Image (cartoon, rainbow, N blue to C red):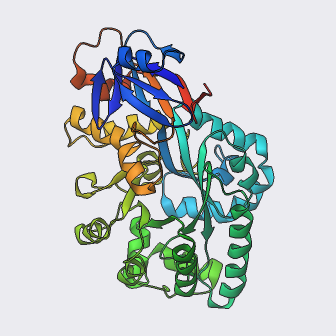
Amino acid sequence: MRIITAKYIFIDNEYKENMAIAFNRKIGRIDKLDILKKDFNDAQIIEFQGEVVIYPGFINLHTHLEFSANKATLKLGDFIKWLYSVIENREELIKELDNNIIEFAINEMLKSGVTTFGAISSFGADLKACAEAKQRVIFFNEVIGSNPAMVDALFSDFKIRLQESMEYKSQKFYPAVAIHSPYAVHPFLIREVLNIAKKENLLISTHFLESPYEREWLESGKGAFREFFQRFFNTSTPVTTIQEFLNHFKNIKTLFTHCTQATKDELEFINNHNHSIIHCPRSNRLLNCGVLDIKEVKNLLLATDGLSSNYSLSILDELKAALFLHSNIEPNSLALNLINSITTNAANALELKVGKIQKGYFADFAILRVPDDLKDKEDIPLHSIINSKVEAVFIDGQRVI
């Protein structure tokens, strides 16, 4: 058993002082330091001096590591132009990809305090690097394809990739599934993949109403998506409607990503069915997709998306962007909500023993140093976002940074 302590520990959404954590691989007890020293008199004491906060390890549940070779190949500024550039350049970017590039991206997350991340995997090219990552990984095997003639082949490919990922299953690697989006997945594939997810108790993620183009296409079959689908897929008819897509997920907990174009009623549907919404503010801005109304979201999660539509995978960078984007919300309360979005809220979405400093949870910690002249505990969340540095990171009770 070891004991870790600092001036502040983030417990139950509060910054507790004069507390310490006894842990090995998991958290054993949380109590006053002198009490833990007495009860575990041979424990190693790890004490951080000064204005330091021990957080549960941060959780980034949406990234696309297979596009980590991108810097400026893909076109930013408009979602449909970006989508064209993905189709035109994806083979080149996958060809450039190697484990070193993926490991660099994974390490960037780690340096920002991320101890658990979600990887959306379309091809399985990131499987080995994710399986060997220091962090816990939720590996979302993604299904994509709306052409009826291709659904059997696409489903077969998906099952092969899922089975390969299942071979790595452990307490640090969790196979999962992803439905790309309502515009890009045939209803047959959605049903069959969700059946597998229910049977195997796998977490589910999906992109949903990311851009105005998507909403226009699903509602009317018109707009820029019509030309896109005619050019690449020889079709001019959406395979589903918004409500039909949502109905697939009535009875299965799901992570809905983006939702910038969702109506209040659609957000309410997601809230009422125990789902979560993943917010990727920098990606949404860089693709000109609009702004998620986070006031209407019951369980908000924050994530970086991938380097296909972002310039870094630092969760601290993402927190800063969200703080400044949502200028209609008072900064201090927003900062605490954002901290919760990568800790407590993410823990609730995952139903794994991560994201909270609580007995029985994994000893995954992100330890941040905040300014020495900080005088009010109410300011800790804000300064954790705008004015901090990562002092240390622990995973499974072991210091990795």
The one nearer the camera, 220 or 60, is 60
Residue 241 in sight here? yes
Q: Residue 136 at what x, y percent from top left?
A: 59, 45
Residue displayed at 23% across by 58% down: 296
Q: Residue 85 at what x, y percent from top left?
A: 63, 60
Q: Residue 324 at what x, y percent from top left?
A: 32, 36
Q: Look at the picture and state if 157 lies above or below 287.
A: below
Q: Look at the picture and state if 49 lies above or below 157.
A: above
The one nearer the camera, 383 or 229, is 383
Q: Quadrant of residue 42?
A: top right
Is 294 displayed left or right of 386 in the figure?
left
Q: Look at the picture and state if 353 lies above or below 270.
A: above
Is 173 displayed left or right of 50 in the figure?
right
Residue displayed at 34% across by 42% down: 340
Residue displayed at 36% across by 56% down: 290
Quadrant (top left/top right/bottom left/bottom right) for the C terminus: top right
